[in-house]
Image (cartoon, rainbow, N blue to C red):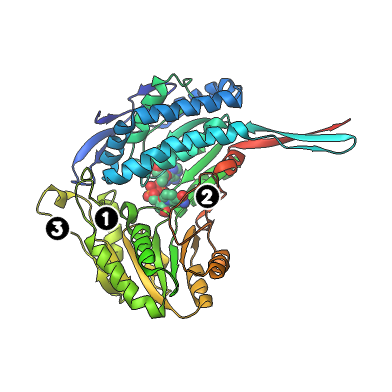
Amino acid sequence: MSDQVAHFIGGVPVAEGEVFAGHDPVTGREVRRIHEADRSVVDRAVAAARSALPGWSGLPVAERAAWMRRLADAIEERFEDLVAAEIADTGKSITQTRTLDIPRGAANFRSFAEIAAQRPEDAFHLTDVVSYTVRRPLGVVAVIVPWNLPFLLATWKIGPALVAGNTVVVKPSEHTPGSMAVLAGIAASIGLPPGVLNVVNGFGPGSTGQFLVEHPGVDAVTFTGESRTGSAIMKSVADRVKPVSFELGGKNAGVVFADADLEAAVEGGVRSVFTNGGQVCLCTERLYVERPVFGEFVARLAGRARELTFGRPRDEHTTMMPMISAEHRDKVLSYYALAKEEGAEIHAGGGVPSFGDDRDGGYYVEPTVLTGLPPGSRVNREEIFGPVCHVAPFDSEAEAVALANDSEYGLAATVWTSSLSRAHRVAQSLQAGLVWVNTWYLRDLRTPFGGVKLSGIGREGGTHSLDFYSEPTTITIKL
Ligand code: NAD
């Protein structure tokens, strides 16, 4: 794989702009040189998307859906190249990359192709009036995505945007440009019309990301990332009143009742707290456990946290990955220190693992289980985005719901119980866009995805994505 990452504009690679370094999170070594798109490169990318728009949006939806299926097929053919690019950027384990990140990318194109191709237009008839709606694309859509699930999250937005007839300019995270560079090559190799998919690399504020969202040729912004970045982007696009779809941060709660299958709840806790090094927006950082099983739950979760393995990404038994960058590792460690200052009891982790090899230069932190902090502590309120959770006891269903809802965020929640009625009751009381019962991160791509409060604006998924990436026009005819 090339260690130089170019932009992709109008169907060809463009290696222009200042160059910055990308680092391997496993060792901290520099592994890439990435070009930063300045205003003139962003201008060219937006112009390429704009000139491709009439042709692309003029295609019948069935033809655009066929392109999406071709992209999905080509992703599967280049599967191992995408796996390698994603691992090089993130240090995530090969097992997860092969089973989650890359297959979901192909599924994102395929499922939106099926949904869009089968979607009927609305039509309403009165005796002497017929009204119907046509949906038209928004135009050029800026796709801004983070580093934690680079391929999965970018394709989740590119697929529906393209099938709805938009053209896109994608800005991956500065930390993880690799898999979008491979996707650009795939698009060129299957002959996707030039300008339909463009990729520009660079940073956020005062750089490529800001230039892109502010650009007058960009009609809408779809963004996944931190809540405060969403707020900055909203200010940037306010004057032009551009539509935004925001998937933002979380401080997700899990509620474990004493009647739950404890083994399943512990295993679910391990997955929901430590998957991807805790760097998934859906990860649980606050667990509330009914008092009779609290002690046993904490002991078992801490025991399982200590068993997680820090192998190399390509070792299939590896279950813990590094943080994405030195800066993010330091942020997570600052919360470990803060937890101690705030008086937490540490049941597992709390520090940095030591390897005695080149991984000591990488960005690892220990999976950590905390108890003993009040609901108002910063550790319980702020998104840490690392392999850490705080566990607190509760005594009643009402208390559990109140504790779980006591957050500025509202992305996802989990409920563990064997009572059917309690499962429904509690799930419906939780202020979150997604609630999983006796499972975590089980996704049906047709269902709405998104958060409430600081966790986002709007929903994507299935027809909800197609609604965002298109505008209806209602046509009413007097017969
Ligand atoms: P981030 O907000 O720092 O960056 C995300 C992207 O925005 C990057 O590409 C960055 O370069 C760009 N950016 C930053 N400032 C910008 C600006 N002013 N204008 C335009 N672009 C700008 O987020 P991150 O650290 O990369 O990702 C972690 C965050 O993402 C966490 O808060 C996590 O919860 C959130 N997240 C949310 C979801 C979800 O679906 N709700 C999914 C994954 C991650």
Q: Is mark 2 within 8 Å of ligand 1?
A: yes
| Residue on which the image places disc 3 | 354
Secondary-structure class at tag 3: loop
What is the tally of numbered marks visible in this picture?
3
Residues under labels 3 and 1: Cα distance? 14 Å
Q: Is residue 312 above or below residue 4?
A: below
> Which residue type carries mark 2?
Phe
**Rendered residue at 27%/55% (across/down):** 329
Q: Which mark is residue 329?
A: 1
Position of residue 252 measured from the top left corner of the image (x, y, whole percent): 44, 62
**Rendered residue at 62%/40% (across/down):** 467
Camera-near label (2 vs 3) is: 2
- N-terminal-most mark, 2 or 3: 3
Q: Are marks 2 and 3 in contact (CB under 8 Å)?
A: no
> Which residue type carries mark 3?
Ser
Classify the position of the N terminus by image quarter. top left
> Which residue type carries mark 1?
Arg
- N-terminal-most mark, 2 or 1: 1
Foreground residue among 365 and 313: 313
| Residue on which the image places disc 2 | 449
Q: Are marks 3 and 1 in contact (CB under 8 Å)?
A: no
Can the viewer see residue 204 in this picture? no
